[in-house]
DNA sequence: GCCATATTGTGAGTATACTGTCAATTAATT
DNA sequence: AATTAATTGACAGTATACTCACAATATGGC
């Protein structure tokens, strides 16, 4: 009877799991972002969307989701909220009636410009407890790991370059 | 006019932010967990709850949330789902009419025992792309960082030891 | 030109994750 | 003992994050 002896379970089955640690760090990262940026009423996801629309004016929702690796359905609601705040406008694409193109408003460009220092502060704070050398090491390994695991996520990141050739003419 | 020159925004404002990288790794971690454990119909959060109830039979929802650092409100729904699957039962505490104590059912203990190898496989897979030495380095730094940032999260982890003294008599 | 296929945005449904608030209950203070 | 504090579980509300499905539209093979 090889299966009659159950393994004794300890909290290590949670605390030492990398997945649990990544979840905790994500919670901490969001909390620090919200705290530093509360004057701007923007979430981390909304910030990423604004940056991307700023660097890719006229991008559509599907491409936006690929560039920041966020779920397409989720992004619909995110854009709605950015529209409600009047940071973003959607214009129908003339050559494809399905597509709605995204642009920043003046207010959107302004809030993006203004929020940057607070975002940087939040990003610095979350690594602050580590020694400078360790910060660099962690960031390098994390960047590597995200890149190497890209295909494992449900919404793999498709870099901007890859998208430029995916227009309705390619 | 010192503020008239806006900083040019690039996608680095997203891609190199540790908060973005932690979000991506969390997405990847969940995707790998779900993929490896799909036969058991358990989410990462539900798994953590089961482990904790297994090692702390008779724990209540508030203490459970502190031990795994999950939001108390969120945990209510998680427990409901575990109850619906008949992996967990809630019994009213005799000495405090507000409290409902949590216990694993036979089915809950069984699924927890059975799912372990799949959980381990998922956890191994998410670090797999790194060299073994780098895995150790990353895990050590990540553990350190989560611990040192504990108070920054909205729901700081309160270790089991700290909770033993927080009973209604302490 | 027609038909199968793919894409785009959208909506429903589930699950985390947080903010509040609230009633019931218990504990602490006076 | 009576008032005040704190705690517990519950609920409403917002925001991400994913699934699947669906209509409108566009594209490719034929």
Image (cartoon, coloured by chain):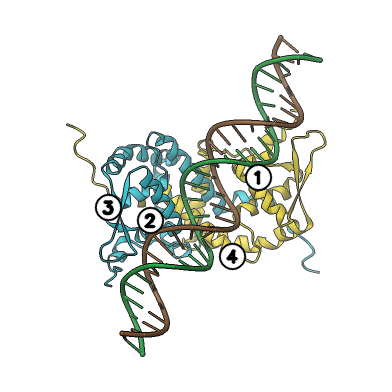
Chain colours: A yellow, B cyan, C green, D brown
Provide the chain ID for the residue under circle 1. A
* Distance (Cα) linking label 3 and label 2: 12 Å
Which secondary structure lies at badge 2? helix
Numbered mark located on residue B68 in the image: 2
Residue B70 image offset from top left, x and y in percent: 42, 56
Q: Residues within 10 Å of mark 1 (few under 14, many from 20)?
A: few
Looking at the picture, tell me which residue is in the foreground, B144 or C10: C10
Of the 4 image quadrants, the one containing the C terminus of chain B is bottom left
Which secondary structure lies at badge 1? helix
* Distance (Cα) linking label 4 and label 1: 26 Å
Residue under label 4: A36
Mark 4 in CB contact with mark 1 (< 8 angstroms): no
Which secondary structure lies at badge 3? helix
* Distance (Cα) linking label 3 and label 1: 41 Å
Position of residue B137 in the picture relative to residue B55 (left or right): right
Residue under label 1: A76
Q: Are marks 2 and 1 on the same chain?
A: no
> Looking at the image, which residue sits at the far left?
A1
Residue A129 image offset from top left, x and y in percent: 47, 63
Q: Quadrant of residue B151?
A: bottom left
Provide the chain ID for the residue under circle 2. B
Numbered mark located on residue B55 in the image: 3
């Amino acid at each position: 009877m090889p299966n009659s002896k159950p393994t004794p379970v300890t909290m290590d089955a949670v605390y030492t799991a990398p997945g649990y640690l990544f979840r905790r760090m994500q919670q901490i990262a969001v909390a620090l972002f919200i705290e530093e940026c509360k004057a701007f009423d923007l979430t981390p996801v909304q910030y990423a969307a604004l940056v991307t629309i700023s660097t890719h004016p006229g991008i559509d929702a599907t491409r936006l989701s690929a560039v920041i690796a966020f779920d397409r359905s989720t992004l619909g609601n995110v854009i709605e909220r950015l529209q409600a705040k009047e940071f973003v406008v959607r214009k129908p694409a003339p050559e494809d009636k399905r597509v709605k193109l995204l642009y920043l408003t003046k207010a959107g460009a302004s809030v993006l410009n203004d929020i940057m220092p607070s975002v940087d502060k939040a990003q610095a704070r979350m690594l602050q407890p580590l020694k400078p050398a360790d910060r660099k090491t962690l960031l390098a390994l994390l960047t590597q790991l995200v890149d190497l695991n890209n295909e494992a996520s449900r919404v793999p990141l498709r870099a901007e370059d890859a998208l430029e050739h995916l227009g309705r003419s390619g």
